[in-house]
Image (cartoon, rainbow, N blue to C red):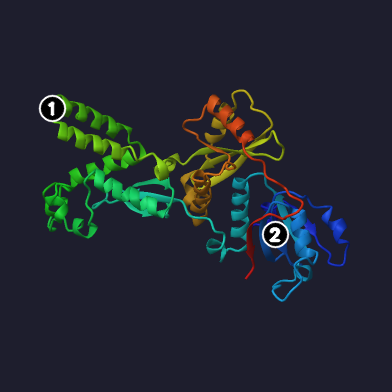
């Protein structure tokens, strides 16, 4: 089993009969993820707090002892403390997840509170293809498109693809093709009805492929609609031109709002810039499908910095094998949470396909403008808490 010190790299021994004030002076009044453990190293409580010193004083100094509601006398149980400094919400969430997975392997998934990364899966080459929302990111045939903001938005993408490309809404009927019975959508002209043989499955798979392409990059379909719209208007077919324009406007919703980060899963690749330990420091994380790695901590923007990062990304870091178990998808859930967060303390995430020296330099400066974590002496600042059952 992986030792907790591989994640939380600092260790303290606690003597309940010792001088608490002297003990507390050895601890930083800083933002940390930390674990309280008993004399055998068994986990007691995992926390993420803004002020470790105050948190330990509260838990080990008797400030929680008053009243009948006290559930745990930490002073009598805790003998070891493992911790690691963090400098951003992203780093804190990532470290907390990794520690929770190690310390509480049977229960962490339902207790850490991280939402999954939602994607849409489709395999155009399947016998009967369809779009389906999913959090299963394991390697398989077809395409995974995401991340999408939440479950409801993922279902909205499925329905939008069906409406815009006249796809089958009733999969139980589609699987009977070509001997199925067409539904009302055929009569409304909103489905070519491959189910009853009115169109071929080859043509239907082509429509599925176009829909998947548009969900990731709608620009080509919008350009096609623009040409058709101008042609219709030139022929004085204004009603038709209006319908084509409405179709193009609906296509433009792909790539925006809850779909703004949607792309093929192989393109789930970012350079994340987050605050470092000092005011001018910026930590750089490399993110690929299922994996996150701290690459460096910058104290200034080096010249041609992206050339260094691209060289790092050219290695085998982040191969598809990272998604063979649940942990890879869960890490992507942590990233997805921060991608869709509106807070001004989330750092900057740059898709690696579009990063250059200019965008990297701007991101570095933007991070330094973001709010600095407040390490208050008056409050431990509990962000996350997970206790052994």
Q: Which residue is mark 1?
A: 236
Point out the frontmost of discs 2 and 1.
1
**Residue at 24% across, 52% down:** 127
| Mark 1 neighbour density, 10 Å: few (under 14) some (14–19) many (20 or more) | few
**Residue at 15% across, 35% down:** 239
| 103 lies left or right of 238 | right
Q: Earlier in the sequence, mark 2 or mark 1?
A: 2
| 290 lies left or right of 142 | right
Q: Is residue 310 above or below residue 79?
A: above
**Quadrant position of the C terminus in the picture:** bottom right
| Mark 2 neighbour density, 10 Å: few (under 14) some (14–19) many (20 or more) | many
Position of residue 183 measured from the top left corner of the image (x, y, whole percent): 15, 56
Task: Tell me if I can see residue 30 in this picture.
Answer: yes
Tag 2 secondary structure: strand
| 323 lies left or right of 130 | right
**Residue at 66% across, 58% down:** 47
Tag 1 secondary structure: loop
Q: Which mark is residue 129?
A: none
Q: Is residue 304 above or below residue 158?
A: above
**Quadrant position of the N terminus in the picture:** bottom right
Position of residue 72 measured from the top left corner of the image (x, y, whole percent): 71, 71
Q: Is residue 65 above or below residue 151?
A: below
Pick the front one: 157 or 176: 157
Q: How many marks?
A: 2
Q: Which residue is mark 2?
A: 35
Position of residue 86 measured from the top left corner of the image (x, y, whole percent): 67, 47
Q: How far apart are labels 2 and 1 at the CA level? A: 72 Å
Task: Tell me if I can see residue 79 in this picture.
Answer: no
Q: Quadrant of residue 235?
A: top left
Position of residue 4 measured from the top left corner of the image (x, y, whole percent): 68, 57
């Amino acid at each position: 089993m992986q030792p907790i010190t591989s994640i939380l790299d600092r260790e303290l021994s606690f003597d309940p009969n010792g001088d608490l004030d002297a003990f507390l002076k050895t601890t930083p009044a800083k933002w940390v993820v930390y674990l309280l453990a008993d004399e055998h190293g068994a986990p007691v409580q995992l926390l993420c707090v803004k002020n470790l010193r105050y948190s330990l004083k509260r838990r080990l100094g008797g400030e929680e002892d008053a009243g009948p509601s006290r559930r745990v006398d930490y002073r009598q149980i805790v003998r070891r403390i493992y911790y690691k400094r963090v400098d951003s919400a992203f780093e804190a969430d990532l470290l907390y997840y990794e520690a929770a997975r190690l310390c509480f392997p049977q229960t962490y998934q339902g207790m850490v509170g991280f939402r999954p990364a939602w994607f849409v899966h489709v395999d155009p080459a399947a016998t009967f293809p369809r779009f389906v929302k999913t959090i299963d990111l394991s390697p398989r045939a077809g395409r995974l498109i995401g991340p999408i903001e939440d479950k409801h938005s993922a279902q909205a993408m499925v329905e939008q693809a069906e409406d815009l490309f006249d796809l089958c809404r009733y999969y139980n009927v589609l699987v009977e093709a070509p001997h199925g019975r067409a539904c009302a959508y055929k009569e409304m002209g909103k489905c070519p009805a491959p189910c009853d043989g009115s169109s071929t499955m080859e043509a239907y798979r082509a429509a599925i492929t176009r829909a998947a392409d548009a969900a990731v990059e709608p620009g080509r379909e919008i350009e096609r609609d623009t040409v058709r719209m101008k042609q219709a208007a030139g022929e004085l077919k204004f009603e038709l031109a209006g319908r084509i324009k409405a179709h193009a406007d609906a296509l433009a919703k792909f790539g925006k709002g809850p779909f703004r980060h949607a792309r093929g899963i192989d393109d789930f690749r970012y350079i994340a810039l987050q605050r470092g330990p000092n005011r001018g420091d910026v930590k750089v994380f490399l993110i690929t499908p299922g994996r996150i790695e701290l690459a460096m901590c910058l104290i200034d923007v080096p010249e041609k910095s992206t050339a260094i990062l691209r060289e790092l990304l050219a290695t085998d870091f982040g191969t598809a094998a990272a998604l063979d178990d649940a942990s890879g998808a869960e890490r992507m859930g942590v990233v997805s949470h921060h991608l869709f967060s509106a807070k001004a303390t989330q750092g900057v995430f740059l898709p690696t396909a579009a990063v250059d020296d200019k965008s990297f330099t701007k991101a570095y400066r933007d991070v330094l403008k973001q709010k600095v974590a407040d390490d208050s002496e008056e409050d431990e600042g509990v962000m996350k808490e997970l206790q052994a059952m």
